[in-house]
Amino acid sequence: MSQAPQRPRAANILITFAAFVVVVAGLRAAAPIVVSFLLSIFVAIISAPPLFWLENRGLPKWLAMLTVITGIVAVAFGITTLLGTSINDFSRDIPFYKTRLKEQFGGLLTWLSSHGIQITREQVVGDFNPGKAIELVRDIFNGFGRVLTNAFLIFLTVIFILFEAHSFPRKVRAAIENPEKKLKRFEQITENLIRYLAIKTLSSLGTGIAIGVWLAIMGVEYAVLWGLLAFLLNYVPSIGSIIAAVPALMLTVVQLGPISALWVALGYLVVNIVVGNMIEPRFMGRGLGLSTLVVFLSLVFWGWVLGPVGMLLSVPLTMTLKIALDSSQETRWMAIMLGPEASVGGAKSEAS
């Protein structure tokens, strides 16, 4: 009996690449519904530990579920109300802030010219337009606002996911052969992912509160909005804190002057050093299991595919992709490439 001819390795690579392009194009086309579903999973993962904690303390399942759902509704209502009111007021004032920025920017150019540094407005504006940073903030919040229009769908999906949380592991064990061997590493990485999301949420909450309080003390307008922006963008690795600080600093320059902006910048710096370099590493231990380059590239990729929410979920999505790649011997090399250098030695010892 003749065997079917095997495709060359190059053909397999091309087919895999073509399938990847089709999947990415499909994700971009279906971004609104995909983002809602992914955000539902994200909220459910964060809500699962409190649900299990309440049940372990003796609360009936229905009462624990009701308590968690009430908390979710309260937080969602607060964020939605805050976003709606603050964004409308902020958007109304954007033309005024842009005009003031241009005036102060012109004053800076005049001061530089008086000291022998000749820079024309056209030269600088071609590479740097300070008003664009304020518009970027509006676009980011509008992106989150559009997601919240599907709040009812997200809410229902979260409820169903939480109801299935207990039975899902049993279903997986019943569906595959040798479940203990195959699921051991998967459960370990999944626990690390849940731990990461829980710690990151708490640290982001602390960052947002600290920034909001500091800006309120300094007298900066929309301090609560900037605190919310710091909370959201703290999920974005590497550059999230920088993006959150720039518009608040520009608004401080317009409203209070450059000296106050320096104090605001100092506050951002202190909060991010304390939270990002002292508190988070202490509780996260070894970290994400992703290389720094992969973390940054995932931020760019998922932000391009899914928008602002994709940036927020870039690390959890990439961690999930790594879990899927690591589950097969044929694709494990890609999971190793996504991981940090410290994981290479462990992978070699397992292979031997």
Image (tube, rainbow, N blue to C red):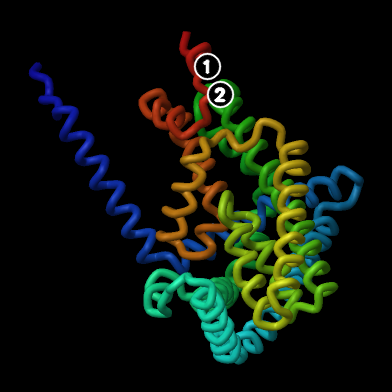
Q: CA distance from mark 1 to mark 2?
A: 6 Å
Q: Residue 259: which quarter of the image?
A: bottom right
Label 1 crowd (10 A; few <14 / some 14-19 / many >=20): few
Query: Residue at 70% across / 63% down in the picture?
Result: 265
Mark 1: which amino acid? Answer: Gly
Is residue 307 something that shows in the picture? Answer: yes
Q: Are marks 1 and 2 in contact (CB under 8 Å)?
A: yes
Which residue is identified by label 1?
Answer: 345
Looking at this view, name the residue that lies furthest to the top: 352
- At mark 1, the secondary structure is helix
Q: Nearer the viewer, residue 287 or 33?
A: 287
Which residue is identified by label 2?
Answer: 342
Looking at this view, name the residue that lies furthest to the right: 58
Mark 2: which amino acid? Answer: Ala
Q: Residue 239: which quarter of the image?
A: bottom right
Is residue 70 positioned above or below 107 on the image?
above
Residue 63, percent from left and from top: 85, 59
Tell whether 116 sits left or right of 190.
Answer: left
Is residue 311 positioned above or below 83 on the image?
above
Q: Which mark is residue 172?
A: none
Is residue 147 something that shows in the picture? Answer: no
Q: Nearer the viewer, residue 133 or 6?
A: 133
Label 2 crowd (10 A; few <14 / some 14-19 / many >=20): few
